[in-house]
Image (tube, grey):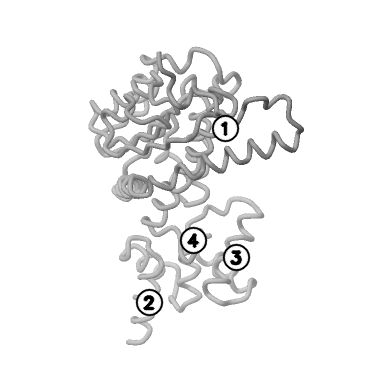
Amino acid sequence: MDLTRTEQRNDRATGLDEKSPDAVLRLLLDAQMDAANAVSNQMESIADAAQIAAETIAAGGKLAYAAAGSSGLMALADALEIPGTYGIPPDKVIILIAGGIASLHRLAGTYEDDASQAARDVADVGLDESDCLIAVSASGTTPYALAAIDEAKKRGLKIISIANNRDVPIFDNADVAITLETPAEMVAGSTRMGAGTAQKIALNLLSTLMAIHLGHVHDGYMVNLVADNIKLRERAARIVSAISRCDLKEAAQFLHASGGSVKSAILLAAGAKDAEEARRILESNQQRLRPALSELKEGLGSR
């Protein structure tokens, strides 16, 4: 049986265990860079996926991730960071990882082969046609991911599939297929390395572009972050200060008046009479700060 790319050993790994530590690390790093470059020819597919994800969230739907093993960890990292970074409600970002919490204690095992559990997981969180599923699998053949797709498709979800081999089953029912053809691994079959690196980059790009579409990024600032600790409250004040060109003390005051909303604080700094007006302007502009600022400026000019 022919080995898929994700199961093959990279030819540069010959004699790897005989080389100096520096030489080993340089070879590993080069392989990581090659894996990262594998993402570059999937920009159109990633953009299409981000558009679907943004439309799903904007319409009140859920974004669900389904994966197993190392791919599950890549999906988990992306999904867990979205609510805090971009202010998307946690109940709108669903994580389906083979084995559930148990897999975080022991990643290996039979979890990824449990197709029936995948179907139950999709059903248990109540996913429907208003939602979107992102399925991730290095091989593209993982039973858990495939079964999650099958159940999601029955329920009418949009499907985004990510894998590191071409022409694999995970793409059969995909609305968007993201094929990350990473080189053979330096440690054969260890997809946490090259394949995982490419997956994480692709997911970073997808979720960040989604947030931009939703209006949660302005001039490179995360203007919809959830400031729930000291570091993030300080960051929020710096963001308000940088965009509004006010000092940090004023920024903190505007944040307090806005109830912690960075976007509303920026509108207050720009002249909104109160937090209610700021919220109204944001709502009329689908939470997008740039057109909200333009509307406020026009309104101030006519007062």
Question: What secondary structure is marked by label 4?
Answer: loop
- The residue that appears at 76% across and 32% down in the rendered structure is 20
- Which of the two marks, 4 or 2, is nearer to us in this view? 4
- Which of the two marks, 4 or 3, is nearer to us in this view? 4
Say which residue label 2 marks. 296
State the residue in front, 108 or 82.
108
- Find residue 237 and name its label: 3
Give the distance between the C-alpha atoms of the residues marked 4 and 3, in whole angstroms: 11 Å
Give the mark, 1 or 3, whose residue is nearer the N terminus.
1
- Which of the two marks, 1 or 4, is nearer to us in this view? 1
- The residue that appears at 43% across and 75% down in the rendered structure is 272
Percent coordinates x, y for residue 182 in the rendering: 47, 35
- Find residue 223 and name its label: 4
Could you classify mark 2 by the number of other residues whose Cα lies within 10 Å: few (under 14), some (14-19), or many (20 or more)? Answer: many
Percent coordinates x, y for residue 118 in the rendering: 38, 20
The amino acid type of the residue labelled 1 equals Met
In the image, taking residue 44 as reference, residue 254 lies left or right, namely right
Give the distance between the C-alpha atoms of the residues marked 1 and 4, in whole angstroms: 33 Å
Give the distance between the C-alpha atoms of the residues marked 2 and 3, in whole angstroms: 21 Å
Question: What secondary structure is marked by label 1?
Answer: loop
Give the mark, 4 or 3, whose residue is nearer the N terminus.
4
